[in-house]
Image (cartoon, grey):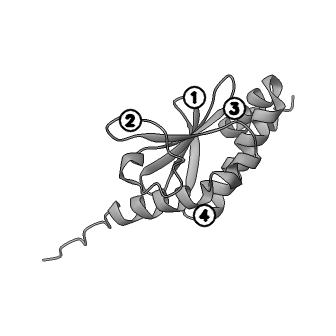
Amino acid sequence: MKTDPVRTDPVEALLEDIRLVDEDRYQVMLSLRRLILSVDPSITHGVKYGGLLFSAGSPFCGVFSYARHASLEFSRGADLADPHGALEGDGKKRRHIKIHHRDEIFKKNVREYVERAFRAVSRTVKAPRPTRTR
């Protein structure tokens, strides 16, 4: 018996579930995933909290599907510069950008925000301390 390759990968399974519900939201999620992973080869991702969580040593953003939009959420979004006024939210740390259609990814300068968040987490991730020898 063959296993379904889509169902063996949690990321692909989540995306497929979204595709079955709403093709447009699936395309938004797929485009955001590709964009985020293209920022740097060290970025990893997986399914967490019902969405895709992206890390570079430490989590820095996530993409989540809602009934009418996808949300790109930044773990420390309150610390990000917002020159285009795209960030929403007034919580202590998090900010998000709502994406209803794929063309908004470009219009809302999403890549710039992802790069800022990636650089911020890359600066804060500490290198392991060298082992002392006697």
Q: Quadrant of residue 13?
A: top right
Local packing at callout 1 (Cα closer than 10 Å; few below 14, some 14-19, many 20+) is few
> How many angstroms separate mark 4 from mark 3 (CA)?
22 Å
The residue that disc 1 covers is: 50
Residue 124, placed above or below residue 7? below
Q: Secondary structure at mark 4?
A: helix
The residue that disc 3 covers is: 14
Q: Earlier in the sequence, mark 3 or mark 1?
A: 3
Where residue 55 sits in the image (x, y, percent)? 49, 52
> How many angstroms separate mark 4 from mark 1 (CA)?
23 Å
Where residue 56 sits in the image (x, y, percent)? 48, 57
> How many angstroms separate mark 1 from mark 2 (CA)?
22 Å
- In percent of the image, x 70 and y 36: which residue is there? 100
Kind of residue at disc 2 = Asp
Kind of residue at disc 3 = Leu
Along the viewing direction, whichever of 102 and 36 lies nearer the viewer = 102
The residue that disc 2 covers is: 90
The residue that disc 4 covers is: 39
Please name which of the two marks, 3 or 2, marks the residue nearer to the observer: 2
Are circles 3 and 2 on residues that touch, CB within 8 Å? no
Res. 70 mark: none
Kind of residue at disc 1 = Gly
Kind of residue at disc 4 = Val
